[in-house]
Image (cartoon, rainbow, N blue to C red):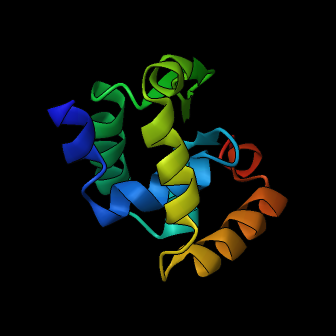
Amino acid sequence: MIEILKALSDETRLRILAQILKSEMCVCEIEECLELTQSNASRHLTILRRAGILESYKNAKWTYYKINKEFISENKELYDYVINKVSQLPWYESDCRNFENCRMQDLCAQNKN
């Protein structure tokens, strides 16, 4: 429980989680949408994954992240609370606009070259 709460106590990790709650995301999308460096995004994703909040899988050379279903089932009240509250944070609207712009760009396809 302590590891989960520590993972959720960082603004950048909450920003990442807020977008992944809508849809699984590739690391390149997370970097672009939230204007993070590769190393910064990876560090925060690792913390969320180790806490059991996210899970990842590889597709070719890309790593995708999504909400861990086991986390949801074991922490339903916390999960519902996060979903409810994260949309009220000041950066949520602009991050959502960036998320939509990133989705339209198909960043993973662009990075194949």
Q: Nearer the viewer, residue 108 or 75?
A: 75
Q: Quadrant of the N terminus?
A: top left
53 vs 56, left or right, is left
Answer yes or no: is residue 33 visible.
Answer: yes
Please name the residue shown 49% across and 50% down the image.
Answer: 81
Query: Could you tell me residue 89's position as x and y percent?
Result: 48, 75
Please name the residue shown 58% across and 65% down the image.
Answer: 33
The residue positioned farthest toward the left in the image shown: 2
Please name the residue shown 69% across and 44% down the image.
Answer: 108
Tell me if residue 99 comes above or below residue 82 in the rendering.
Answer: below
Q: Quadrant of the C terminus?
A: top right
47 vs 94, left or right, is left
The residue positioned farthest toward the right in the image shown: 104
Tell me if residue 78 comes above or below residue 91 in the rendering.
Answer: above
Query: Could you tell me residue 11's position as x and y percent?
Result: 32, 65
Please name the residue shown 52% across and 20% down the image.
Answer: 73
74 vs 107, left or right, is left
Query: Could you tell me residue 49's position as x and y percent?
Result: 36, 29
Query: Could you tell me residue 2's position as x and y percent?
Result: 15, 35
Using the rendered view, name the quadrant where residue 50 is placed.
Answer: top left
57 vs 8, left or right, is right
Answer yes or no: is residue 37 visible.
Answer: no
Using the rendered view, name the quadrant where residue 102 is placed.
Answer: bottom right
